[in-house]
Image (spheres, rainbow, N blue to C red):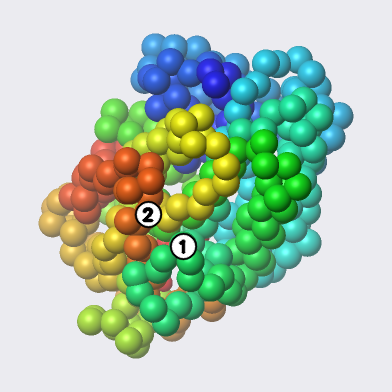
Amino acid sequence: MKNILVTGGAGYIGSHICVALLNADYKVLVLDNLSNSKVAVLERVKEITGRSLQFVKVDLLDTQKTAAVFEENSIDAVIHLAGLKAVGESNKLPLHYYRNNVVGTLNLCERMAKHNIKNIVFSSSATVYGEQQVLPIKESAATSPTNPYGRTKLIIENMLRDIYNADPDWNISILRYFNPVGAHKSGKIGENPRGIPNNLMPYIAQVAAGRIERLCIYGNDYPTADGTGVRDYIHVLDLVAGHIKALQKLVERPGIMNHNLGTGAGYSVLEIIAAFEAITGKKIPCEIVGRREGDVAIVYADCSLAKRELAWSVDNGMREMCEDVWRWQMQNPTGY
Ligand code: WQD
């Protein structure tokens, strides 16, 4: 299984996965529509690894161009990351999210089936869990997504399960990401949100860099130690390592599997701010404002299944997450 198609490979998670795949001697073909990424990222990937990769600018909704990718390339497995992922935006544009995420994945799976390519690692999200009473969250927890983005991820998970039930020759890994943060240690690739960041860590980095005046803390009246939201932040390099392990597992133990990729530790917004200030020496001006619609109080993973079944471990703590985000931010003040 050497030839890997990475959909969304020019994105934040995707570019880090391409680095890891190239370093592990896989051949990489990136498919990306560049709707939320820049091709410049792939030059950085080549710089970091000293290796080349192939790139096709294709939208999975373009069935003809997607079919051509499969006709013209040798593909052994797919790591499927392409998708829209802004929770707030999905509330405003549900049809855009269902079409892009669900129909795009449907097109991809139909092409895979036609070419008898039955190995896929799918980028899912902890958002499928919604509000959970029992913490940490296990993979067996009931899913109850609270927004269209999360619901598209759950629909795709169930589509993959149905594909497997109809044809157990498929080998499927579903990975539920908690909160990916951080950047490659070189500072050459990192999270490069368009416009004002939705997510906490890139927002804090831009405040620290003086690009944004202050951080708005969305509520301090949650049932948590300091009243602010608690999340399971995982370094992107650890998240990526989980993908490589899952890809290898598909060969070792065929079938369908589902794993949480988190650290098992929860940090509040105030704790993240304090950690970032301590590590960078930068003061983060902030203001408490009202809660953000759709936010839940506490989310963190039980990641013991992935540690056991994938022989995967987490190597980076909060210090590395903040240091690596800051290095990326300082080396790329305005992104790519
Ligand atoms: C984290 C905490 C906010 C911004 C989402 C998706 C998830 C994944 C990661 C795609 C919360 C608080 C944030 C800010 C704040 N994305 N916050 N001020 O919402 O946990 O998860 O992004 O896969 O699927 O659901 O991440 O970073 O937006 O928020 O106070 O300006 O920071 O309230 O408590 P979230 P986040």
To which quarter of the image does residue 55 belong? top right
Question: Which x, y percent locates residue 182?
Answer: 33, 45
Question: Which x, y percent locates residue 299?
Answer: 39, 70
Disc 2 on helix, strand or loop? Answer: helix
Q: How many marks?
A: 2
Q: Is any atom of residue 289 visible in this view?
A: no
Find residue 305 and name its label.
2
Question: Which x, y percent locates residue 53?
Answer: 54, 16
Residue at image position (75%, 22%) is 69
Residue at image position (60%, 64%) is 150
In the foreground, 56 or 126 = 126
Q: Is residue 81 above or below residue 94?
A: above
In the foreground, 45 or 203 = 45
Q: Is residue 83 above or below residue 143?
A: above
If the image is split into quadrants, where does the N terminus sit?
top right
Mark 1 residue crowding within 10 angstroms, few (<14) / some (14–19) / many (20+): some
Q: Is any atom of residue 245 visible in this view?
A: yes
Disc 1 on helix, strand or loop? Answer: loop
Amino acid tagged 1: Glu
- Of labels 2 and 1, earlier in sequence is 1
Amino acid tagged 2: Leu
Residue behind mark 1 = 139
In the foreground, 220 or 251 = 251
Residue at image position (73%, 65%) is 94
Residue at image position (67%, 57%) is 158
Alpha-carbon span between mark 2 and mark 1 = 8 Å
Mark 2 residue crowding within 10 angstroms, few (<14) / some (14–19) / many (20+): some
**Contact? badges 2 and 1 (CB < 8 Å):** yes
